[in-house]
Structures are given as structure tokens and as C-alpha cells.
């Protein structure tokens, strides 16, 4: 290791190694998306069905939790921390021309170590704090409380990174810049409020957020902070690779020869797939190579919006927040010629007039309708006679109790499909599908696999979140006297109705749901704001999830593959409730 660090190229290898676990186990993987967005008020498993995946979405679905399901993440975290510790400890061996040059490079390791530890304490609570290279095996490691980890490592590492990282340009890449460090300083300082009744760092969160906000509104003259003037531009594909609003993002690359990739064939960005509903349940949508390489692509989705998430987009005047239809796909065209046969007419409760009608390629095939949509009443009244499959919000979601409809009462009963409301609901496989991660840029390994994920970038943090950090921090620091302006900044940009009055914590949480759903935030948001203190909040917003919730599930289980190697089987190291 010392030999590697003794040349500039060798030392750069040590820095590069700090990214490996983050690329392989974190961003862009189903593991990381379920750990940060699953088990929250915003999502349930596809069609709300009882399968093994519900353990990821419903706090283990009442079964004994499999404490190895966090194994890759846990091992990857400490692999990453170890790599960062090596790079930091050996920085003095590298022949940089000046101390400033050395600090600018080692700042990356400090930044990444802070990110590893931030996610570690938010997922697992107390963790073992290691800040130096380790040569001996400790079979009885101690755990350090989260606030201490924040004070001793996470915040100091980010402060160092902010001081020494380059400003970079507007289109910041995978390597962090000053605005990434400043954004995460605001984020982690805000997160400390869940551990500190005095909310010591809330003022710092507000200070750091305001530094970025002021820079963005002044044209990015100091840190290149930027927020697109319209919501549409944030997730437009042409803005993905060099997204100016992203404070930090990760890009996926394929080899120049078309073979291999920077992240491994099976570890490319699959985020778009996780939110796609099962459109292939309807015969006009078939799973083929062309479909998988189209915008949206492969229908292997696991994330279904909860009723609470959809209701967050209903504005006070009853209209839909414009972000809804800009963030979710609700219509799909046919990609195969399809003729309604008797089986499909019966299955989907269509009227007899639909029998024999044909959809050509490119015709509208599926349409999910919301009660707030224009012409909803007319469309709902004639839904059973349409030549395409109309899926009514009211057939999928309850109006009053925030659950998913698991049964359905047929208007046109036939054999196996009854009018008594006891038949399986076959419509809840079709739901609004989040498009934030969609891409038409795929890496194809070979025809049999069809594709191995997309090559676009995913944003780990973007400027809009900074405004909402400022709003929440202002509530803690100033009673919310300045919070309204920050919230309304994101709403005005989206074309949504502006709020009035003094916002409270729920207002900020709701706005974060609308703006940031699917962006690795929600589990931490609910922890920070106390929504996991008891069942009350989840009973109101996601009763299907609440029935499996215990307060100790706000922390994940330590994987048994690790704890079993410790003294006495590692029982002392496990989180409560597992």
C-alpha cells in the first residue's frame, strides 16, 4: 500500500478505490433504493401483493427479518471506509508539489468517508468508528452513538472537503466539488436534529443552505450552484449527463469498444426499472428488445406509489400539482397489434361492445385516470366501453383509508369474476410510474440479456433539496418565519399553487415528498422528523405498512454474516428487535 501511494498515479488509484463500494452497492441498485425509499409512507410493493419483496417494503411483513439482507451494503460500507482511511493516512507519501495540491486530492476521500458514515448511522444507528487503517481483527468492536460520529467524523470530513475540493463547473460529475460538500454539510447538519434535543447544528444547516441558495440566485458566481427555471428541465434526458442542478451525481459508462462497463455488467443503473408498473399484463404491451430499449423500458417494477403519495399532489383547490404528470407516466401506447378476445373482456370487466376491437401499434393501450384529471368524470363513466384499458384511480386505491384495493366488484360478472367484491383486483398492477430515472441510453451486453441497465446519471443531491433543507432548518431556528419563501421557491418553479402562512414540519415533509420522491431521501426524512417514533403517522398515511411497524425498525438489522464472527456470536452488537 505504501509503495502504491509513493507515486501520484499510484495514489490516484487509492482515491479511485474509495468509490468502488458506492458504485457497486449503493446508488442505482435496488438494494439502495429500497433502503432509502422503501418502508416509507410513499411506496408499497408492486400491486401490493404478498411476495418476498414485501419484506423490503413492509418491515419484513411480520416475518422474522432476514438479517443478511443488508449484508452487501454493510460490507460495502466498511470496504469504502477502509479505502478512505488508507487514502487519508497515506496522503503524505505521495509526491505532490505542494500541501495545497495534496489537500485538493485527499479531500475526495474525506468527502466519501463522510457519505459512507452518514448512511451507516442513518441505517444502523450506532456503528463502529474507524478512522485509521486497520491491521488487526477486532472480535469485540464497540459501537459509537450517531451524534458523536457526526461531530467527530462526518461534519469535520465535509468541512475539510468544502475547504479543499475544486469549484468545478456547472455540470459537476461523479467526483465531488465544493457545492457537493456544502450541500451535504447542510443535509447532515439538519439530520442531527433527530439525535440532539438542543438542535445544535440546525443553525449550521440553515447557514450552509443559504450559502448555496444565495450563490444560485446570484448566478453561481462562487460555487456554480444552479436551479433550473422549470421543473421539466431537471429530468429532461438532454440535461441528464451534465445536469446543472445536481450538486453531486454518479454517471455510468460503457467501454469504448462496446464491451464491459465502468460498474460491471450487472451493476449498471436500474433505477428506471424499479418504478415501472407491469404493463405487460395487458396484451397490447409485449416484452421485447425494442420495448426494453425504449424510454422507460423493462417493466420489472417493484415500487408502487402509495395513495398518500398520490394525494400529496392534490392541491388545496382540488387540482393536481403540475409535478404529478411531469414525474409519473400514466399512459402507454400499444407496441404490438392486439385484439380484445373474450378472456380479456371478462378479465378486465369490459362491456361486450369491446369484444373484437383492435389496437394497432402506436394506439393508446393503457390509461390510468386520476379524479383530478380533466374530463375524469366522462372518462370514468365510459371506461368499460373504451377500446383501450382505462384504469381508474378509484378501482386501485381506496378513497378514505389510504389502502390499496386488493379485491374488485365486477360490473359485468362472468365465470370466475364476481360482482360481490371478492374477486382479485387485477387492475392494481397498473399504476402511475415514476419517470425521474427514465433513460433511452442503455448498455446491451448481448441479445439474450437484451440490456444490462442504463448509462445515464443519477443525482444523489440537487439544488431544490437545499431550499427544503433551509425551510426545515428555519422552523427549528426561527420558528418558521422564513420557511415559506424557501418552500414556495420549489412550488413556483413547478407551477404549483403557492402556500401561505407559517409552514410547519408537516408542510415541509409533504413538499419533500412531492419534489424528491424516488431520490434516496424518504426513509431519512421520516427518521429525522420523528415519524417513526410510533405508529401514528404511518397509520394515517400507509396503514398497510403500519401493521408491520415497530419503532425499533427505524434501524436496520446488522447482518448476521458479520455479527456471527464476533465474540459470543455477536448478540451484543445487534440492534434491538432483531
Image (cartoon, rainbow, N blue to C red):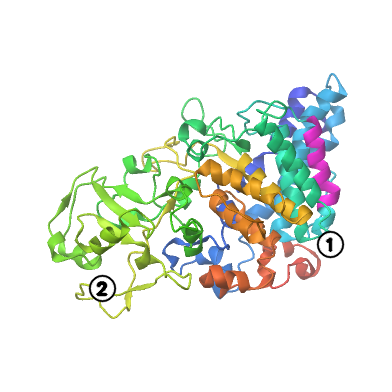
Q: Is residue 217 left or right of residue 400?
A: right
**In the picture, which quadrant includes the N terminus?**
top right
The rendered magenta stretch, by its main secondary structure, is classed as: helix
**Residue annotated with mark 2:** 410
**Residue annotated with mark 1:** 140
Relative image position of residue 393 (x, y in whole percent): 37, 62
156 magenta-colored: yes
Report the number of numbered marks. 2
- In the picture as drawn, the residue positioned furthest to the front comes out as 501
Residue drawn at (54%, 37%) of the image: 457
Residue drawn at (80%, 49%) of the image: 203
Instruction: Decide: few, some or many residues near mark 2? Use Cα within 10 Å; few <14, some 14-19, many ≥20.
Output: many
Provide the residue span drawn in magenta: 150-164
The answer to whether residue 422 is seen in the rendering is yes
The answer to whether 74 is drawn above or below residue 540 in the figure is above
The residue closer to the viewer here, 517 or 107, is 517
**In the picture, which quadrant includes the C terminus?**
bottom right
Q: Determine whether the residue tagged by mark 1 lies in a helix, strand or loop.
A: loop
Q: Please state which of the two labelled residues, at mark 2 or mark 1, is closer to the viewer.
A: 2
Residue drawn at (62%, 31%) of the image: 173
Amino acid at each position: 500500500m505504501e509503495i502504491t501511494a509513493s507515486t501520484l498515479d499510484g495514489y490516484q488509484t487509492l482515491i479511485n478505490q474509495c468509490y468502488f463500494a458506492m458504485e457497486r452497492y449503493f446508488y442505482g441498485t435496488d438494494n439502495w433504493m429500497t433502503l432509502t425509499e422503501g418502508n416509507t409512507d410513499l411506496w408499497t410493493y408492486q400491486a401490493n401483493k404478498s411476495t418476498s419483496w414485501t419484506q423490503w417494503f413492509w418491515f419484513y411483513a411480520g416475518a422474522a427479518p432476514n438479517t443478511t439482507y443488508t449484508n452487501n451494503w454493510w460490507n460495502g460500507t466498511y470496504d469504502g471506509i477502509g479505502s478512505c482511511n488508507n487514502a487519508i493516512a497515506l496522503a503524505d507519501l505521495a509526491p505532490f508539489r505542494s500541501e495545497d495540491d495534496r489537500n485538493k486530492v485527499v479531500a475526495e476521500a474525506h468527502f466519501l468517508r463522510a457519505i459512507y458514515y452518514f448512511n451507516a448511522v442513518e441505517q444502523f444507528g450506532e456503528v463502529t468508528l474507524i478512522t485509521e487503517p486497520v491491521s488487526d481483527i477486532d472480535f469485540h468492536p464497540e459501537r459509537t452513538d450517531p451524534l458523536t460520529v457526526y461531530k467527530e467524523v462526518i461534519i469535520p470530513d465535509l468541512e475539510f472537503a468544502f475547504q479543499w475540493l475544486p469549484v468545478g463547473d456547472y455540470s459537476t460529475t461523479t467526483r465531488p466539488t465544493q457545492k457537493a460538500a456544502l450541500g451535504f454539510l447542510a443535509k447532515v447538519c439538519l439530520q442531527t436534529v433527530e439525535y440532539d434535543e438542543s438542535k445544535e447544528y440546525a443553525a449550521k444547516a440553515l447557514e450552509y443552505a443559504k450559502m448555496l441558495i444565495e450563490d444560485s440566485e446570484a448566478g453561481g458566481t462562487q460555487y456554480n450552484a444552479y436551479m433550473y427555471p422549470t421543473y421539466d428541465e431537471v429530468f429532461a434526458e438532454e440535461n441528464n449527463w451534465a445536469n446543472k442542478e445536481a450538486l453531486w451525481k454518479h454517471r455510468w459508462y460503457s467501454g469504448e469498444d462496446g464491451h464491459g462497463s465502468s460498474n460491471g455488467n450487472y451493476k449498471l443503473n436500474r433505477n428506471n426499472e424499479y418504478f415501472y408498473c407491469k404493463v405487460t399484463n395487458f396484451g397490447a404491451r409485449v416484452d421485447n428488445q425494442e420495448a426494453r430499449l425504449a424510454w422507460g423500458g423493462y417493466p420489472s417494477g417493484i415500487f408502487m406509489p402509495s395513495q398518500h403519495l398520490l394525494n400529496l399532489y392534490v392541491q388545496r383547490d382540488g387540482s393536481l400539482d403540475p409535478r404529478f404528470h411531469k414525474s409519473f407516466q400514466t399512459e402507454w401506447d400499444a407496441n404490438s397489434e392486439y385484439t380484445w378476445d373474450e378472456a380479456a373482456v371478462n378479465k378486465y370487466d369490459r362491456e361486450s361492445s369491446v369484444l373484437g376491437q383492435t389496437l394497432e401499434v402506436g394506439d393508446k393501450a393503457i390509461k390510468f385516470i386520476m379524479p383530478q384529471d380533466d374530463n375524469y368524470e366522462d372518462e370514468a363513466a365510459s371506461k368499460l366501453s373504451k377500446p383501450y384499458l382505462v384504469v381508474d384511480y378509484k378501482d386501485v386505491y381506496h378513497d378514505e383509508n389510504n389502502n390499496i384495493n386488493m379485491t374488485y366488484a365486477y360490473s359485468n360478472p362472468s365465470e370466475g369474476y364476481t360482482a360481490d367484491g371478492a374477486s382479485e383486483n387485477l387492475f392494481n398492477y397498473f399504476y402511475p410510474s415514476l419517470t425521474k430515472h427514465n433513460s433511452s441510453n442503455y448498455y446491451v451486453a448481448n441479445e439474450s440479456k437484451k440490456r444490462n441497465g442504463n448509462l445515464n446519471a443519477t443525482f444523489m443531491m440537487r439544488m431544490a433539496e437545499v431550499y427544503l433543507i433551509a425551510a426545515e432548518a428555519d422552523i427549528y431556528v426561527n420558528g418558521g418565519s422564513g420557511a415559506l419563501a424557501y418552500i414556495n421557491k420549489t412550488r413556483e418553479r413547478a407551477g404549483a399553487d403557492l402556500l401561505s402562512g407559517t409552514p410547519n414540519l408537516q408542510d415541509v415533509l409533504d413538499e419533500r415528498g412531492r419534489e424528491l420522491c424516488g431520490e434516496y431521501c424518504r426513509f431519512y426524512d421520516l427518521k429525522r422528523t420523528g415519524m417513526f417514533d410510533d405508529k401514528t403517522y404511518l397509520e394515517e398515511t400507509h396503514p398497510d405498512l403500519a401493521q408491520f411497524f415497530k419503532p425499533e425498525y427505524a434501524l436496520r438489522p446488522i447482518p448476521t454474516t458479520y455479527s456471527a464472527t464476533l465474540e459470543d456470536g455477536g448478540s451484543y452488537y445487534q440492534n434491538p428487535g432483531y
